[in-house]
Structures are given as structure tokens and as C-alpha cells.
Image: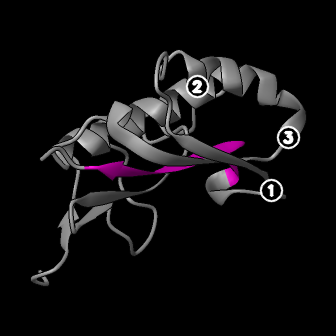
Amino acid sequence: MSHHRETVTAAGAPNAAGPYSHAVKSGGTVYLSGQTPIDPETGTLVEGPIGDQARRVLDNLAVVAAAAGAKLQDAVRIAIYVTDISKFKDVNEAYGSYFESDPPARTTIGVASLPLGAEIEMDAIIALPH
């Protein structure tokens, strides 16, 4: 471990699908790697409506945030990547249920494809509590 950064491995989150950490803490901030809608118990992608997939992604991010000593609701920025931007209304509805007040800054990007054939992925930057 470097003295200015600490990697976080989150028990209960899907295993990393490559050479990356679930999150890295540095300077009062935690940077969460992208999560797809993988069910951590089965290791498979959640199928069904994009809203259900978005909730699984947010649940996965919440597990990683907790392992870093934070809450997802403390996020200052979340990026959303979707393969079908026409389904964004359903993503937005699911997302809004996690951030009912004071939501973080956000960007949404339509992409051609995502790892493991996922339809949605999100990453987050969280301000750690003082």
C-alpha cells in the first residue's frame, strides 16, 4: 500500500473482472470502480428490465462504498454508462430512488458495449466523512 492511497476490496461485491481494485481511497475521497449488474451471489448478470439492472448496480456500489467506510449517498459524482440511451427514463427512475434529496453530480454516456455484455455500468466518487 502506498502512503497516499489505500485500495479497498469489498466482501459481498462481485469479484473484480480484471486487474483493478473495487475502490481506492486517497485524500479524503474514495473512487469506486465501475460496477455492472452482476449478482454477487451467482456471479452472473441480472437480466430483465434496465431499472432492475440499475438497482443491482447501485446496490453493488453501496457495498463497495460501505467497505471503504462511506455511504453511496455521500457520492459527489456518479457516471452512468448505458448501451441503449432510449431506456434512460427507467434508469433515471431507479437512480432517483437512491438519491431522493441532494443527489450527486452525474453524467450519462451512451456506449456501444460494456464488459461481460452488460447493458449498464456506473462508477462513483465519494467524499469520505470527516
Give the labeled residue for mark 2.
Answer: 95
Could you tell me the amino acid type at mark 3?
Answer: Asp
Tag 2 near tag 1, CB within 8 Å: no
Where's the N terminus, which quadrant?
bottom left
Could you tell me the amino acid type at mark 2?
Answer: Tyr
Could you tell me the amino acid type at mark 1?
Answer: Val
Q: Which segment did they paint magenta?
A: 117-127
- Secondary structure of the residue carrying tag 1 is loop
- Mark 1 or mark 3, which has the lower sequence index? 3
Residue 97's x, y, as percent? 53, 15
Label 1 Cα crowd, 10 Å radius (few <14 / some 14-19 / many 20+): some
- Secondary structure of the residue carrying tag 3 is loop
Which residue: 63% across, 59% down? 115
Mark in front: 2 vs 1: 2
Q: What's the colour scheme? A: one colour
Give the labeled residue for mark 1.
Answer: 111
Q: Quadrant of residue 65?
A: top left
> Was residue 123 drawn as part of the magenta stretch in this picture?
yes
Give the labeled residue for mark 3.
Answer: 84
Relative side of 74 to 104, left or right = left
Q: Of all residues shown, which one is farthest toward the bottom? A: 2
